C-alpha cells in the first residue's frame, strides 16, 4: 500500500488526512494487508467459498406496512429542515 | 462518409419498481402520493444501529420477473454495499447486488418488422432506491419517501442496433412486468426507468466504441428519438476526428437533443463488498419451480397462439396481447361466443371505441366479456343483425340484463321469419313501381335502393341476406 492509493481511498471515503496521518495510516494499513496476504497463502483449492458464516438460511419479513415515526419525528435530529424535508448544503451536479 | 457506414450498439438498464406495499428492508409504505417524509423511518433514514430485514415479497417478485425473462435464478444471491456519497443516500451506501445477482443470463423476445427477435438479458439484480433531491441553488431539499423502495434492475446485453429496437425492448419489458403484476410500469411517476447505453462503430468492426449513458428517459418514443440523435452526434464526432467521452447525458424532449450531465473521468470506484447486515438469499428448487408453474402466459407466446390457433391477424393479435387485461377480456368473450374473429373485431373496434370515449378501463367495462360474447352469438345465430348489435352494445352499457333479453324488450330481434320480411319486401316494391321497372329494364344497381328501403321499413331488423335473396326473387318476375 503506497501513500497514493491511501490518498485515493481517503478521498473516496471523504476523509481529510494530514501528512502525518497519511504516513501513519499507510504503515498501519500496510500491516493489515500483509496479514491478509499471509491468509491468502493458505491453499484453498477444492474448498467451496463460504457464502455465510451462519447456519441461518433466510430471515425475512412479510410485506406489511407499519408507520414507525411521523415526519416531525424523523426530522427531529436534522440540523436543518424546511417543511417536512431535510435541508442540506447545495449539491453540485 | 455517411452515417450508414456506422452502426449503433445499444444496451439498456431498466429500473423496475416492484409493486410491494412496504419497502425492501423496512416496513415504510411505498405509495407515490404520500406527503413529504411520511414514508421515512429510522431504517430508511440510515440511523445508526438500525438493521435491514428483507421483504419476502420482493424476492418472490424478482423470481417471477427473472423467470419471465428466461433467466437462470441463482439459488444463492448476495446483497452488497455500493459505496458513494450523496445526500439522498443517507447510509453512504446503497444496498444492491454485485457479483451474485438473483437473476442471470436470460432473454426477451421483441416483436419488430413482423417477427420476434431475441434480446439477451445479462442480469437482473435487487437494490434499494435512493431518496429524492430537489435543488434550489444555495440549498437542496431531501425527501426520503423513495429511499428503500425495492427496485429490480434489468440489464440487457449490448444486442440492439437501432432506435426502434431500443424502444420496442423498453415496451416489451413494461408489458412483461405488467403481465406479471410486479410493477405498474408508470414512466412518468418513475416506477419504470430506462437508462440507455449507446456507442457507435464502423459496420463489421468487432470492438466496441466508447459508450455514453443517456439517463431517465420518460417515454418510449423519447428513447427512440434520443437514440437517433445520439447516434448521429457520435458519428459526426468520430467523423470529424473527435474522441467520444465516456459520460452521462440527459435527453431534452423539447429541443430533441442530448446534453452532457457529468463526465465519468475516473471509472467510478464503488468499493462493493457483501453487506454483513444481510444474509444471502437462499432459494430451493421447489420454490423456483413452483413460481415457474404459476407464471402467466407471456405476451409473445400468447400472441403466437392467437395467430396460429385462433387464426387472428398480426395487428389484432398484437393489440389484444398488449395488456393482460385486454387479452383476458378477449379470451372470455371468445369462450362465450366461440367465434375468435368476431370476438377480436368487437373488442378491438366497437368495445374499445366505447371504452375510450368514456375513459373506462377494460377491466371496469360495464359490458362484461360474457355478455359481449352472448351478443356475438346472437349475431352468429342470426337472431340480430350486426347493426342492431351495435345499438344493443350501447344499450348494454347502462342495462345489466343479457343481450337477448334486452333485444326482446326493445323489440330489436331480427326478422328471421321470411314470411314477415317477404311482406315488407312486397310492400316496398309495390310502393316504388318506377324503380322496380328500372331494375327490370336492366339497371340492376338500383337494388341498393330497395335494400335500403326494406331495412328502413324493418327498422334495421331484417337480415340483409334474406332481404337480398327475397328482393332478387321478387324483382325478377313480373
Image (cartoon, rainbow, N blue to C red):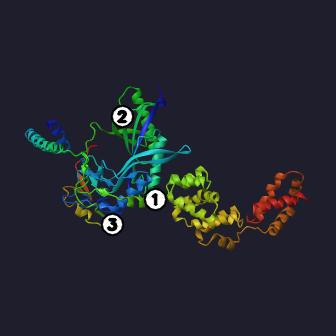
Is residue B430 found left or right of B4 in the rendered image?
Answer: right
Splitting the image into 4 quarters, where does residue B237 fall?
top left
Pointer 1 chain: B
Answer above or below: position of B261 versus B390: above
Marker count (numbered): 3
Q: Quick check: B59 left or right of B47?
A: right
Q: Which mark is residue B187?
A: none
What's the CA distance linking mark 1 and mark 2?
A: 39 Å
* Residue B295 circle label: 1
Q: Residue at x 34, y 55 (%)?
A: B75
Query: What residue sits 46% from the left and 54% below the top?
Result: B176
Query: In the rendering, which numbered label is found on residue A64?
Result: 3
In the image, what residue occupies the spot 21% across and 58% down? Answer: B47
Q: Which picture quadrant has residue B207?
A: top left
> Mark 3, chain letter?
A
Q: Which of pointers 3 and 1 indicates the residue nearer the eye?
A: 1
Q: Secondary structure at mark 3?
A: loop
User: A24 or B433, which lies in front?
Assistant: A24
Q: Which mark is residue B210?
A: 2
Of labels 1 and 2, earlier in sequence is 2
Label 2 element class: loop
Mark 3–mark 2 distance (CA, rounded to whole Å): 45 Å
- Residue B403 visible in image: yes
Q: Whole-Å distance between the Cαs marked 3 and 1?
A: 24 Å
* Residue B222 appears in the figure: no
Residue B280 percent coordinates (x, y) = 28, 56
Classify 10 Å Cα crowding around label 3: few (below 14), some (14-19), many (20 and above).
some
Residue B413, position as x, y percentages in the image: 71, 69
Q: Secondary structure at mark 1?
A: loop
Amino acid at each position: 500500500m503506497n501513500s497514493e492509493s491511501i490518498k485515493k481511498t481517503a478521498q473516496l471515503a471523504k476523509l481529510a488526512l494530514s501528512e502525518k496521518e497519511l504516513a501513519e495510516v499507510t504503515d498501519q494499513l500496510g500491516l493489515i494487508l500483509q496479514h491478509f496476504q499471509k491468509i491468502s497463502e493458505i491453499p484453498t483449492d477444492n474448498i467451496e467459498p463460504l457464502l455465510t458464516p451462519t447456519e441461518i438460511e433466510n430471515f425475512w419479513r412479510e410485506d406489511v406496512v407499519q408507520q414507525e415515526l411521523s415526519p416531525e419525528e424523523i426530522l427531529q435530529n436534522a440540523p436543518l429542515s424546511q417543511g417536512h424535508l431535510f435541508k442540506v448544503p447545495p449539491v453540485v451536479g | 462518409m455517411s452515417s450508414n457506414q456506422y452502426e449503433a450498439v445499444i444496451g439498456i438498464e431498466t429500473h423496475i419498481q416492484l409493486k410491494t406495499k412496504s419497502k425492501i428492508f423496512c416496513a415504510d409504505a411505498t405509495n407515490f402520493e404520500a406527503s413529504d417524509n411520511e414514508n421515512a423511518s429510522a431504517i430508511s433514514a440510515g440511523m445508526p444501529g438500525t438493521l435491514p430485514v428483507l421483504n419476502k415479497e420482493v424476492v418472490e417478485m424478482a423470481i417471477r420477473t427473472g423467470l419471465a425473462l428466461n433467466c437462470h435464478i441463482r439459488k444463492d444471491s448476495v446483497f452488497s454495499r455500493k459505496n458513494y456519497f450523496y445526500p439522498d443516500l443517507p447510509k453512504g451506501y446503497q444496498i444492491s447486488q454485485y457479483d451474485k445477482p438473483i437473476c442471470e443470463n436470460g432473454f426477451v423476445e421483441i416483436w419488430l418488422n413482423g417477427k420476434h427477435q431475441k434480446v439477451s438479458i445479462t442480469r437482473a439484480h435487487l437494490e434499494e432506491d435512493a431518496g429524492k433531491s430537489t435543488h434550489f441553488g444555495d440549498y437542496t431539499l431531501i425527501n426520503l419517501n423513495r429511499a428503500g423502495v425495492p427496485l429490480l434492475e434489468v440489464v440487457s446485453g449490448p444486442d440492439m442496433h437501432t432506435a426502434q429496437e431500443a424502444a420496442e425492448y423498453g415496451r416489451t419489458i413494461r408489458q412483461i412486468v405488467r403481465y406479471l403484476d410486479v410493477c405498474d410500469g408508470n414512466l412518468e411517476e418513475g416506477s419504470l426507468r430506462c437508462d440507455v447505453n449507446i456507442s457507435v462503430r464502423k459496420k463489421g468492426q468487432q470492438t466496441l466504441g466508447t459508450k455514453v449513458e443517456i439517463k431517465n428517459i420518460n417515454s418510449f418514443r423519447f428513447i427512440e428519438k434520443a437514440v437517433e440523435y445520439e447516434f448521429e452526434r457520435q458519428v459526426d464526432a468520430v467523423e470529424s476526428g473527435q474522441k467520444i467521452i465516456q459520460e452521462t447525458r440527459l435527453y431534452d424532449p423539447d429541443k430533441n437533443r442530448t446534453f452532457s450531465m457529468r463526465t465519468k473521468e475516473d471509472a467510478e470506484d464503488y468499493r462493493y463488498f457483501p453487506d454483513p447486515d444481510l444474509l444471502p438469499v437462499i432459494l430451493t428448487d421447489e420454490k423456483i419451480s413452483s413460481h415457474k408453474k404459476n407464471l402467466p402466459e407471456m405476451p409473445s407466446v400468447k400472441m403466437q397462439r392467437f395467430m396460429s390457433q385462433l387464426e387472428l391477424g398480426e395487428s389484432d393479435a398484437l393489440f389484444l396481447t398488449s395488456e393482460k387485461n385486454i387479452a383476458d377480456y378477449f379470451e372470455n368473450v371468445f369462450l362465450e361466443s366461440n367465434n375468435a374473429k368476431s370476438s377480436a373485431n368487437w373488442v378491438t373496434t366497437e368495445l374499445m371505441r366505447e371504452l375510450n370515449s368514456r375513459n373506462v378501463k377494460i377491466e371496469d367495462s360495464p359490458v362484461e366479456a360474457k355478455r359481449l360474447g352472448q351478443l356475438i352469438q346472437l349475431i352468429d345465430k342470426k337472431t340480430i343483425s350486426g347493426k342492431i348489435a351495435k345499438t344493443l352494445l350501447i344499450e348494454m352499457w347502462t342495462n345489466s340484463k343479457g343481450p337477448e333479453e334486452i333485444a326482446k324488450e326493445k323489440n330489436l330481434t331480427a326478422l328471421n321469419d321470411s314470411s314477415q320480411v317477404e311482406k315488407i319486401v312486397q310492400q316496398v316494391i309495390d310502393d316504388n313501381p318506377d324503380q322496380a321497372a328500372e331494375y327490370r329494364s336492366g339497371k340492376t344497381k338500383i337494388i341498393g335502393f330497395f335494400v335500403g328501403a326494406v331495412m328502413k321499413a324493418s327498422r334495421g331488423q331484417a337480415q340483409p341476406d334474406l332481404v337480398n335473396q327475397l328482393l332478387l326473387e321478387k324483382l325478377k318476375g313480373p
